[in-house]
């Protein structure tokens, strides 16, 4: 979503974008979306399966794409993604590389601290991160001393969701993201059971796909609340935004890795208070007790207390909603984000960032 928004907005600032990304499902290997060329390759699977033939084929194909596109600058979204393995091999094979910027979207875990990740972060003309927490993590893990900047993700907040808005007549708690344990959606299910046990009528809606979907469904059944938990899978972005605008609270009780919570920023942008865990950059997306609440990670009781407090106090909900709307649109506006990246590109190119030798060991 971030890359799609950036690509569209950067065109208005004279920046042409081509995207190389991993594939999913039956999406075509190449297509043009809103004048942006999209190249899709199976990047992660060959590495997981140690498939040398497909790995070498990806290296050759990315080399071909780079030769055809001839980028002035390469923007790598996270030095821990599968794509950086291929770029690292290509850069080192040729002995030089075009100028590049690395944006870290999550805090580095111990498993992320590989030599490839270190080379990419240290070798980048500029390191950026989507939160101060993610930036500090990358610097601490690699010892980078060169130029680095925090650039918050931007949200495209349209006028179709004005403020102030009224508290919904029916209480819906919303989670948006991958159905994986690290997102803490099982904690949200436990919290719903406890909230309903306190006599508060509420339901939980979960949006997204992932390998833990069935386990979460089983958890809801075991707690006797399955008819109050809805799993919607992956839905259109416009539908997600509408759900956010109709929900009472967005929950992001993540356990790890979060550099920034786009869902929390987008929910705040339509006036929905958020309750998030104190992991990584999540506390940077929510002003505690002003736009929502920040609770200790894996503390279900604290999560329940915050949810119950918001749902039980209409005046509090209205204050949180109004402040969230203002905060998100001033701090996380898309124009501010795009302007920051456009300035970063310009700084690199105007300073003579025309490639360098691969000298990071």
Image (cartoon, helix red, strand yellow):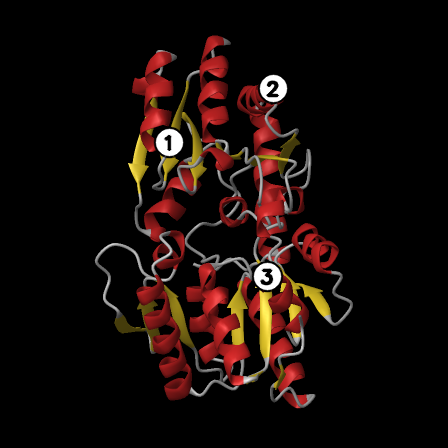
Q: Is residue 49 visible?
A: yes
Q: In this view, does 323 lie above or below 119?
A: above
Q: Can residue 151 be seen in this view?
A: no
Q: In this view, does 173 lie above or below 33?
A: above
User: Where is residue 120 shown, x and y percent of the image?
Assistant: 60, 68
Residue bearing mark 1: 205
> Which numbered dot is residue 290?
none
Q: Residue shown at 60%/79% (left/top)?
A: 345
Indicate which disc, 2 or 1, sits on the residue closer to the N terminus.
Answer: 1
As helix, strand or loop, the secondary structure at mark 3 comes to helix
Residue bearing mark 3: 117
Q: Residue shown at 64%/73% (left/top)?
A: 124
Q: How crowded is mark 2: few (under 14 residues within 10 Å), some or many (20 or more)?
A: some
> Which numbered dot is residue 305?
2
Judge left or right: residue 230 versus residue 18: left
User: Where is residue 228 shown, x and y percent of the image?
Assistant: 34, 20
Q: Do the residues labelled 3 and 1 touch (CB within 8 Å)?
A: no
Q: Residue shown at 44%/88% (left/top)?
A: 70
How many angstroms separate mark 3 from mark 1 (CA)? 36 Å
Judge left or right: residue 327 versus residue 37: right
How many angstroms separate mark 2 from mark 1 (CA)? 19 Å
- Quarter of the figure with residue 247: top left
Q: Do the residues labelled 2 and 1 touch (CB within 8 Å)?
A: no
As helix, strand or loop, the secondary structure at mark 2 comes to helix
Indicate which disc, 3 or 2, sits on the residue closer to the N terminus.
Answer: 3
Q: In the image, which is nearer the foreground, mark 3 or mark 1?
A: 3
Q: How many labels does the image show?
A: 3
Indicate which disc, 3 or 1, sits on the residue closer to the N terminus.
Answer: 3
Q: How crowded is mark 1: few (under 14 residues within 10 Å), some or many (20 or more)?
A: many
User: Where is residue 283 shown, x and y percent of the image?
Assistant: 66, 42
Q: Are marks 3 and 2 in contact (CB under 8 Å)?
A: no
Which image quadrant: the N terminus?
bottom left
């Amino acid at each position: 979503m971030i890359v799609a928004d950036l690509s569209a907005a950067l065109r208005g600032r004279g920046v042409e974008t081509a995207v190389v990304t991993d594939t999913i499902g039956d999406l075509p290997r190449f297509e043009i979306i809103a004048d942006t060329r999209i190249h899709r390759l199976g990047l992660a699977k060959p590495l997981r399966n140690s498939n040398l033939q497909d790995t070498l084929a990806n290296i050759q194909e990315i080399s071909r794409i780079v030769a055809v596109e001839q980028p002035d600058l390469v923007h790598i979204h996270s030095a821990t993604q599968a794509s950086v393995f291929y770029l690292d091999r290509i850069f080192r094979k040729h002995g030089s590389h075009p100028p590049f910027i690395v944006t870290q979207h999550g805090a580095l875990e111990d498993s992320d601290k590989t030599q490839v990740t270190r080379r990419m972060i240290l070798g980048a003309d500029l390191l950026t991160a989507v939160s101060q927490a993610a930036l500090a993590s990358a610097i601490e893990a690699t010892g980078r001393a060169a130029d680095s900047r925090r650039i918050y993700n931007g949200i495209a907040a349209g006028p179709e969701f004005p403020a102030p808005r009224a508290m919904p007549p029916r209480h819906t708690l919303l989670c948006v993201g991958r159905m994986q344990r690290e997102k803490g959606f099982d904690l949200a299910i436990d919290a719903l059971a406890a909230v309903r046990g306190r006599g508060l009528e509420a339901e939980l809606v979960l949006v997204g796909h992932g390998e833990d979907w069935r386990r979460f469904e089983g958890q809801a059944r075991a707690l006797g609340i399955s008819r109050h938990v809805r799993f919607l899978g992956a839905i259109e972005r416009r539908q997600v935004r509408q759900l956010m605008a109709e929900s009472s609270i967005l929950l992001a009780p993540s356990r790890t890795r979060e550099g920034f919570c786009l869902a929390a920023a987008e929910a705040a942008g339509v006036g929905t208070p958020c309750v998030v865990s104190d992991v990584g950059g999540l506390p940077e997306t929510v002003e505690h007790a002003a736009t929502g609440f920040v609770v200790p990670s894996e503390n279900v009781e604290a999560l329940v207390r915050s949810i119950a407090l918001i749902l039980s106090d209409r005046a509090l909900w209205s204050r949180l909603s109004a402040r969230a709307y203002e905060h998100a649109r001033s701090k996380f506006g898309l124009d501010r984000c795009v302007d920051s990246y456009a300035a970063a590109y310009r700084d690199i190119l105007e300073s003579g960032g025309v490639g360098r030798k691969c000298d990071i060991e």
